[in-house]
Image: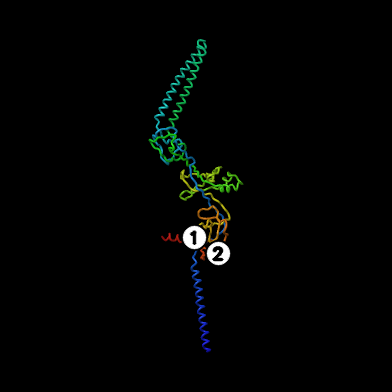
Amino acid sequence: MKNRKVHSLAAIVAASATIFTFTSCGDKSAQQMQGAGAPEIAVLTVEAGSTDLNSSYAATIKGKTDIDVRPLVSGFITKVHVDEGQYVTQGQTLFTLDQVQYQAAVDQATAQVNSAKTALESAKLTAANKQRLFDKNIISEYENQLAKNSLAQAEAALAQANASLTNARKNLSYTVVTAPSNGFVGSIVNREGSLASPSMVTPLTTVSDNSDIYAYFSLNEKDILEMTKGGEITLNAAIAQLPPVQLELSDGTIYPEKGTVATVSGVIDNTTGSANVRARFKNINGMLRSGSTGQILIPNVKENVILIPQKSTFEIQDRRFVYVLNDSNKTVSTAITVAPENDGKQYIVTSGLTPGQRVVVEGVGTKVRDNMAITPVDAAARAAAQQQQAQAQQQAQ
C-alpha cells in the first residue's frame, strides 16, 4: 500500500513537470512568433527647426506689352511681311493694304491744293488792284471790301485743301501697318486677299514685348492682412519687404531668374475676394512667352517649427492624423494641425506633436493601423541604404 502511494506521487510530479515544460515552450514560441510578426516600418524622430517652405499661387504670364495690331483704314491685304513668332522692331512693316484708292485720294487732294494756290494768287492780285483804285477814290469802299473778302476765302480754301492733302497722305501711310514696339509677332489669322478694317473683331496680330515678363496672380484678404501684419504697416511697405520670388513653369521646372513683386492692386474684387498682384521677371533669351502659365513661389521663412512628410499623415472627417510610436513600439493615432503653407512634400505642424516623438512615415493608409506593434527603422538610414544599393546596382551594370 505504501509503495502504491509512492508510485502515485511520482506519477503526479512527472505529469506536472511535463505540463510545465509544454506550457513554458508554448509561451516562448508565442513570444518568438509575436516578435517575428512585427513588421519593420520606417519612422522619423521629429525635431524643431527652421524652414523656408514656399507658398504657391497660380499665375498667368504676360509680356511687358501685348499690343493688338489693327488697321486704321479699310482695305484688302496685299502683302504680309512677317511670320508668326518672328521678332520685329518698332516701326518695322508688318502688313501692306491696297493703296490704289488712297493714292488716288492723295493725287486729288494735291490737285485741289494747286487749284487753291492759283485762286489765292488771283485773289491777291485783285485785292491789291482794288486797294489802289480805292485809294484814288475810283471805287467804293464796298467794292474794295468784297475784294478783301474774296482774298480771305481763297486763303481759307487753300488751308482746307492742305488739310485734305494731309489727311489723304495720312490715310495712305496707314496702308502700311508697322510694329508698334519691339517684340514677337503673335498669330496671323488674316493673310493676303483678306479684307482688313478698323472695326474688325480679331486683330491682324499681336506684338508682345517680352524683354520683361509679368506674372499675374492673386492674394486673398487673409494673405494681404498677414503681409501688412494686420494693418501695422502699409501695403507698399509690405511689398518692399517681400523676398525675391520664383516662377515654377508648367513642366515643373523652376525658372532660373528670380523676380520681384512689383504691384498689388488697391481694390479687392468682390466676386473673388482677392487682389491682383504682378511680379516682374527678366526674360532670359526670350524663354518665356506671353500667354503661358505657371506658379509663383513666395518663400516663407519660419523658425522653431516641426516638419513632417505629407505621406506620413492621413485624414478622417476633415481632421489630419499621424501614427506616433509609444514606448512599446505600438502606433497611436494622433490628431495634428498643419499650416496652410506647404511645398507639396512636407507639412508644418502647428500643434499635436512635440520634438522627440517618433512618427511613422511608411505604409500609412495601407499596412499600418492604430495600436499596431512594429519594428521601427530609422527613415533616413533606410533611405541612405536604398540609395547606396541603387548606386551599387548602377555601377554593376
Q: Nearer the viewer, residue 317 or 33?
A: 317
Q: Secondary structure at mark 2?
A: loop
Looking at the picture, how far across and down is residue 92, in whole percent?
A: 44, 36
Q: Residue at x 47, y 15 (%)?
A: 126
Q: Are marks 2 and 1 in contact (CB under 8 Å)?
A: no
Give the image's coloring scheme: rainbow
Left or right, 49 with reference to 285 = right
Q: Give the amino acid at mark 2.
A: Asn
Compare residues 149 and 278 and report the one nearer the observer. 149
| Image coords of residue 281 (percent x, y) | 50, 45
Say which label, 2 or 1, has the lower sequence index.
2
Above or below 140: residue 310: below
In the foreground, 12 or 169: 12
Badge 1 marks a residue whose secondary structure is loop
Residue 302, position in %: x, y?
Answer: 57, 53
Residue in view at x 48 percent, y 62 percent: 367
Q: Is residue 22 visible?
A: yes
View extreme (right): residue: 232
Q: Is residue 397 above or below residue 289?
A: below
Mark 1 closeness class: few <14, some 14–19, many ≥20 residues within 10 Å:
few
Q: Which numbered disc, 2 or 1, marks the residue closer to the eye?
A: 1
Q: Residue at x 51, y 50 (%)?
A: 56
Please rate how many residues cluster around mark 2, counting C-alpha atoms within 10 Å: few if below 14, some from 14 to 19, many from 20.
Answer: some
- In which quadrant is the C terminus drawn? bottom left
Residue 51: x, y in percent? 55, 54
Q: CA distance from mark 2 to mark 1?
A: 19 Å
Q: Which mark is residue 353?
A: none
Q: Which mark is residue 326?
A: 2
Seen as rendered, the residue at the extreme left is 193
Decide if residue 281 is in sight here. Answer: no
* Mark sitting on residue 365: 1
**In the image, what residue type sits under mark 1?**
Gly
